[in-house]
């Protein structure tokens, strides 16, 4: 069942800490907020419905060291990944990265990403976030090079979920795209992209040779 406007209102209040988390990381980002049931970008085009992991017991959460991917393993031996829409390791384009709020980071900081005991996911939804994107360029005007900066509001999909803790709170992850000046190291571009959820299909030993996952997508 798709989330209701009440669900989004709840997420909006619980994710107020995301703005502090985003703003503390260079390059600068605007406060991130969830809107009231806005039009989604590519909500129904790729990946699996977040409701599929609602009720599952989460065992571990691990982040890839090479690719923008987070792997979530459950007690029923299923595995899901949070991925960035359009990411291709062979044609990476503008570097993409998964960012998250501090509550989500707490899970990744656990030893080997393993929870002390499996916890049920009591709710999981996509949320539409709005952040301030920017691009800096040098343009040639009257025989001089001048710096020009443009900013705009960028809508993008994040994934938020709650665990069955003593005080259940929303944890959220989203995707950024950033590029830097190779000489100065300063940011010249920052925007955002959608994330999606994908179940990893486990192959049997007999047909694993014929249906292997790309190495970058394996947990």
Image (cartoon, rainbow, N blue to C red):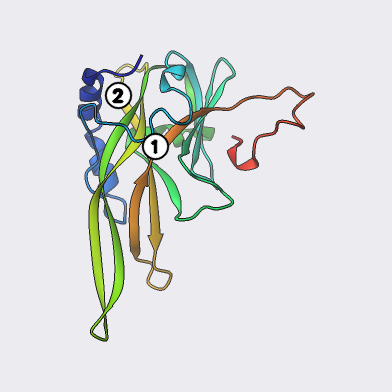
Mark 2, secondary structure of its residue: loop
Instruction: State the quadrant of the C terminus.
Output: top right
Residue 162 at least partly seen: no
Seen at 53% across and 45% down, the residue is 67
Q: Estimate the x, y position of residue 87 in percent, counting from the top left.
A: 50, 45
Q: Which residue is mark 1?
A: 105
Compared with 186, 116 (above or below) is: above
Residue 49 in percent (x, y) is at 44, 22
Quadrant housing the N terminus: top left
Compared to residue 117, the image places residue 107 above or below, namely: below
User: Front-most of 151 and 63?
Assistant: 151
Q: How many other residues sit within 10 Å of disc 2, few (<14), some (14-19) or many (≥20)?
A: some
Q: Residue at x 33, y 55 (%)?
A: 190
Comparing 53 with 128, the one in front is: 128
List the single residue furthest toward the right.
206
Q: Secondary structure at mark 1?
A: helix
Please identify the quarter of the rendering in which residue 158 is found: top left
Residue at the spot of label 2: 169
Residue plotted at (25% across, 20% down): 7
The image shows residue 153 at horizontal and vertical percentages of 23, 47
Mark 1 and mark 2 lie on one chain; the one further toward the N terminus is 1
Up/down of 79 relative to 193, above or below = above
In whole angstroms, how far apart are the C-alphas of marks 1 and 2? 13 Å
Up the image or down, 140 lies above or below 20; here it is below
Is there any visible trace of residue 43 in the rendered image?
yes
Q: Position of residue 99 (x, y in %)?
A: 38, 42
CB-based contact (under 8 Å), mark 1 and mark 2: no
- Bin the neighbour count of mark 1 within 10 Å (Cα to Cα): few under 14, some 14-19, many 20 and up: some
């Amino acid at each position: 069942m798709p989330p209701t406007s009440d669900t989004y209102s709840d997420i909006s209040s619980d994710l107020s800490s995301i703005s502090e988390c985003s703003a503390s990381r260079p390059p600068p980002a605007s406060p991130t907020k969830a809107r009231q049931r806005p039009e989604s970008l590519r909500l129904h085009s790729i990946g699996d419905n977040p409701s599929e992991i609602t009720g599952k017991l989460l065992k571990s959460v691990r982040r890839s060291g090479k690719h923008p991917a987070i792997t979530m393993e459950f007690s029923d031996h299923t595995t899901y990944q949070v991925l960035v829409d359009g990411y291709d390791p062979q044609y990476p384009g503008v570097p993409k990265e998964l960012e998250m709020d501090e509550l989500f980071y707490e899970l990744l900081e656990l030893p080997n990403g393993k929870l002390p005991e499996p916890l049920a996911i009591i709710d999981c939804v996509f949320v539409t976030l709005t952040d301030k994107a920017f691009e800096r360029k040098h343009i040639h005007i009257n025989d001089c090079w001048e710096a020009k900066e443009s900013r705009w509001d960028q809508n993008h999909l994040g994934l938020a979920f709650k665990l069955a803790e003593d005080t259940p709170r929303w944890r959220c992850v989203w995707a950024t795209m950033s590029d830097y000046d190779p000489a100065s190291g300063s940011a010249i571009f920052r925007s955002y992209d959608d994330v999606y959820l994908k179940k990893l299909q486990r192959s049997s030993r007999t047909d694993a040779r014929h249906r292997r996952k790309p190495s970058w997508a394996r947990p």
